[in-house]
Image (cartoon, rainbow, N blue to C red):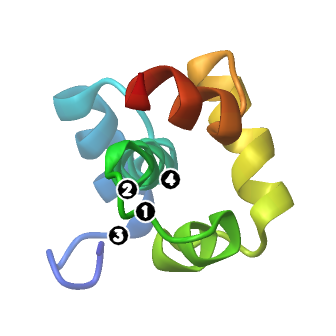
Amino acid sequence: MAAFCALSEAHFAHAFRASFGVAPHEWIVARRIERAAQLLRDRRSPPLDEVARATGHASASHLVRRFKSAWGMTPGQYRAATRG
């Protein structure tokens, strides 16, 4: 992203954090988790390993760790809670 903006990596990271309040990597991780939550709310949601792949996670367990850290519950718990 820094090269696309014609900035050094350090300058880009500093400017990004000043604008968004988080580092670029943290922002990307948050968007991936938000997308996973969106997929999990859908009644036709694919299995967890497919949600993980679709959101850029290395595995379902990787998604579970990050999701639990962000939401305080596992994707399975979230899915059950949002599907009523």
Mark with earlier residue (3, 2):
3
Q: Vertical placement of 32 versus 50: above or below?
A: above
> Which residue is under mark 1?
45
> Which residue is under mark 2?
39
- SS type, badge 2: helix
Question: Which mark's residue is nearer the viewer, 4 or 1?
Answer: 1
Q: Residue at x 79, y 58 (%)?
A: 62
> Which residue is under mark 4?
25
Q: Residue at x 24, y 70 (%)?
A: 7
x, y percentage for residue 57? 64, 69
Q: Residue furthest top?
A: 72
Q: Vertical placement of 15 versus 50: above or below?
A: above
Tell me the CA gap for discs 1 and 3: 40 Å
- SS type, badge 1: loop
Q: Residue at x 23, y 31 (%)?
A: 20
x, y percentage for residue 66? 70, 41
